Amino acid sequence: MINQLHAKTSIILLFLFAGIFRCSGQQHNFEASAKRASQNHITIDAADVRNTIPHTMFGTCIEDVNHEIYGGLYGQLIMGESFEEPASGVNYNEWKKYGGYWVADREYGDSSVSIVPGRHTHRMVGTNDLGVEPDGSARLLYDKDDLSDGSMQADIRFLQTSGNGAGILLRVTDIGIGKNTLKGYEIRLNREANKIQLIKHRNDEQTLTYAPVVFSPDGWQLISAKLIGGQIKVYFNDSLVISYNDGEDPLTTGRIGLATSGSPVSFRSVRLTKEGIEMKLALTNPVEQQVSDRWDVITSDAGDERFSLVQHDAFNGLTMQTIELSAAGGKAGVANRGLNRWGISVEKGQTYTGSCYLQTPTEGLQVTVALESVDGSRTYAQQILTITGNVWKQYRFSLVASASDTYARFALYFRHPGK
C-alpha cells in the first residue's frame, strides 16, 4: 500500500512572499487611516536574524490554479503524491491529453471514454463531482504511433446539446493546449448544423469541405477516414460522404486522436489501420487497474496485477493506493510523470532525495524506486527498499541520475508476489 510520495532536488530557489487581503464589508475612513499611518514607523535591523528560511521552502503563485500549491511550498517533482485524485480509467500509458477532463464511462461498457467540458463532471471512483471550467478544445492524442497512409475510425455519441461538435484527428504535429494549437486534419461532426466537416489546422482553422448528414445525436455514430497522400476520404456510418484531394501543401504524417469543440461527448472503438493491419486501440485501463488519476500503471504481460483505491486507513487524506501482485515473474507498480504528465526533468549527476510511506502484510517485500525514461526502457537511478510491517512507515531514498532526460518518470514497483 502506498500513500504519500514526494521527491525534491537540492536546487534552492528564492522564496517569494505573497500578501492576502481581506475586506470585512465595513465602511472605512481612508483619510483618517492615512493620517494614522503617517505616524507609524518600522525599524529594520538587518544584523538581527530572528529566523531562517528552510532550504526546502520554495516560492509559488498563491492562486490555486491546477494544484499550484498542492502539497505545500517545496521543490516537488511529483504530481498527486497523496493519491487523492480518483481513477479516471483512461489509458494514459498510450494516450496523452491536451485539455479537458477525460474519464472512462462504464455506462457504455469497459472500452469508452467521455469528455464533459463543463462543470460537474462525474468521476469514476468515489461520490464526489469534479468542477472544471468549460474547455472548448479538449484533445486526446494516441502517443504510440504515427499515421501517414492508412485509416482511422471511432464511434462518437453526444451527451448534451451544447458545443460545436466533436470528431477525430489525423496526421497531427506540433500540438499544444488551447484552440488552434496544432497542425493536422480534423473530421468534425457538427451536431447543431447536421454536417460533417473536413478541417485543416495550421495553428488556425480552415474548413476544406463539408457534407450534410442526418443522424440521431443520442446514438452512436461511426466516423472513419482513409488517407493516401493528399487524398482524404471520409465515411459516416459506412457511407462515403467526402472525397477531397488536398493538393496545396498537404500534411503528410503525424499522430491520430480524438477532439471536442465544446461538446460533451463519448468515444469508443477506436481503430487504426496501417499497411493492411488493423489495430484496436485501448482507450481505457482494465477495471482491475484503479490507479489515482495522476499516476500510470506499471504491469507485465503476466496479467497478475491488481490496483485499487481504498478510502480507509489512509496515511494522509482519505485515499490510499493499493497494489497487489499474485504470481511470480510479474511486475506491479505505479509511475509519475510530474505536472500534467509533462515529464520530470532529471540531470546527469544530480541527486534527487525523497521519501514514501508504505505498509504491507507481506513481510520483507522488496520495493524498487527509480528514475526512468518515460516508457521504462532505461533506468537512470534506482534503490531497493525493504518494506516491513502492516503499519505506515516512512522510507527515505536518494537517487543519483546517470543520464539527463527532460521527459523522465518516477517509478515504484515490485516483482515478487505481495501487496
Image: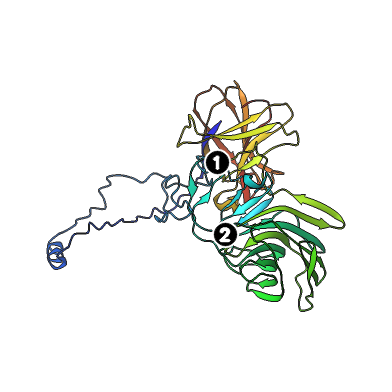
Q: Quadrant of the C terminus?
A: top right
Q: Residue 235: horizontal and vertical position, in percent?
A: 78, 65
> Residue type at mark 2?
Gln
Could you tell me which secondary element the residue under label 2 belongs to?
Answer: loop
Position above or below: 74 against 276: above
State how many labels appear.
2
Does label 2 or label 1 sit earlier along the sequence?
A: 1
Position above or below: 191 against 304: below
Could you tell me which secondary element the residue under label 1 belongs to?
Answer: loop
Name the residue: 73% across, 54% down.
270
Q: Residue 71 appears in which quarter of the rendering?
A: top left
**Would residue 224 be found to the left or right of residue 19 on screen?**
right
Disc ID at residue 160: 2
Q: Residue 122: horizontal and vertical position, in percent?
A: 53, 48
Residue 173 visible in image: yes
**Mark 1 — residue?**
125
Name the residue: 72% across, 31% down.
330
Disc ID at residue 57: none
**Would residue 75 be found to the left or right of residue 160 on screen?**
left
Q: Residue 328 appears in which quarter of the rendering?
A: top right
